[in-house]
Image (cartoon, rainbow, N blue to C red):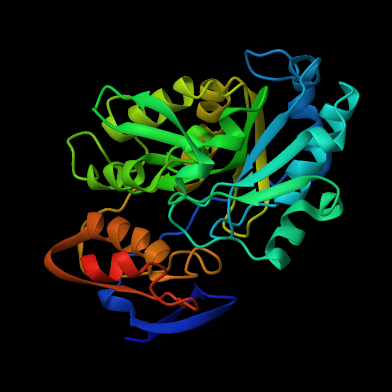
Amino acid sequence: MADIRIDLPYGHDKLAIQVPTEKLVGTFLPRALAPVADAAEALREALASPVASPRLKDLAAGARSVAVAIEDATRPVPNALLIDAVMSELDAAGVSRQQVKVIAATGLHRPMTEDEMAVALGRWFGLVAHENHDADDPQRLTRLGITRLGTEISVNRSFREADLRITTGDVEYHQFCGYGGGVKCVYPGLADAAAIRANHSRMDLPGTGPGRIDGNPVREEVNEVGRMAKVHFNLSMAMDAEHRIVAVRAGDPDLSFRQACRFVDEMYAVEVPRRADLVIASPGGHPKDIELYQSQKAIEEATQVVEPGGNVLVLARCEEGSGSQRFEQWM
């Protein structure tokens, strides 16, 4: 029997593998959804018709300071487009650029470089203030409180003390939080290091797993922290495997996020007929395989469809190595 060739994303390139046809259970790829014709226009339309919320320009009226949390370099988010759309709404409310600060929600990841920040802010780089979150600097944190799971949490001071607090980013599956995106930008993205470690330590609690929100204790705590931090507005997008925007939702931090999740399910929830002895997978190329810390998410997903005692092979470029010294120590 002939082999079948399969190309898998690997960094900025692809790797080809040859699999014997008679041994192949199947090749499972995301379903195709039509990308939006004009990303900037899709963002404007979402902001003009927010989900269960006043328009951002109305929320911003009278605000003396505005904090905008963005995803860091480990996410394939077109931040410059998001910032441009948000700044347009803030400008309509009479908010000056000097009143705005953009904060990279790095969690325990490395800080974004100035070059990366320049790409993220686009034409607003140098015109609005920006900072990388630092989970280890108590001077840049402020205590928020204790969650129902008992996590004592502090968050980024610049974000918490702003009059108007906005989260932005993409929505994607997360191996134990259900979905990334929404107010996950705040916790763990803008939280203190001890709280972030507590968040990650709960990955094996009953109810955790990809695609789960209600009944997932980790995601429910994330949402609880979002309410504690009083996030006013959220801008979420769903993207396809080529990092093209297929949907944008804005407004209420919980409801806008949940609506974006539906598009993620439509693209990425696939049914596999049976488990396989060997699962070969890709995290999706750069930046999802930028380091092992990010790439291990694909390992976790692959274990859901491998036979007990089987093997998982994940093709991940990991150009920045492990991504976390602490992660290395844990391993």
In the shown orientation, is residue 123 left or right of residue 52?
A: right
Q: Position of residue 112 (x, y in %)?
A: 61, 61
Image quarter where the N terminus lies is bottom left
Question: Please, is residue 237 above or below residue 217 in the view?
Answer: below
Q: Is residue 128 visible?
A: yes
Which of the 4 image quadrants contains residue 101? top right
Residue 294 shown left or right of residue 286 in the figure: left
The number of numbered badges drawn on the structure is 0
Q: Looking at the picture, how far across and down is residue 280, in whole percent?
A: 33, 72
Residue 187 vs residue 137, the one in the foreground: 137
Question: For this view, does 193 lie left or right of residue 15?
Answer: left
Indicate the position of residue 213 as horizontal and vertical percent values.
Answer: 36, 30
Q: What residue appears at the point 47 percent right and 36 percent down from the top-left corner?
A: 155
Q: Which residue: 55% across, 47% down?
A: 105
Please state which of residues 192 and 61 is positioned toward the viewer in this rendering: 192
x then y, percent, for residue 108: 43, 55
The quadrant the C terminus occupies is bottom left
Image quadrant in which you'd find residue 221:
top left
Picture quadrant where residue 157 is located: top right
At x 86%, y 48%, the residue is 127
User: Is residue 213 among the parts visible in the rendering?
Assistant: no
Residue at x 43% of width, y 40% of height: 179
Give above or below for 14 relative to 271: below
Up-down: is 75 above or below 87?
below
**Farthest residue, direction left:** 309
Decide which of 222, 257 is in the foreground and name it. 222
Q: Is residue 224 left or right of residue 181?
A: left
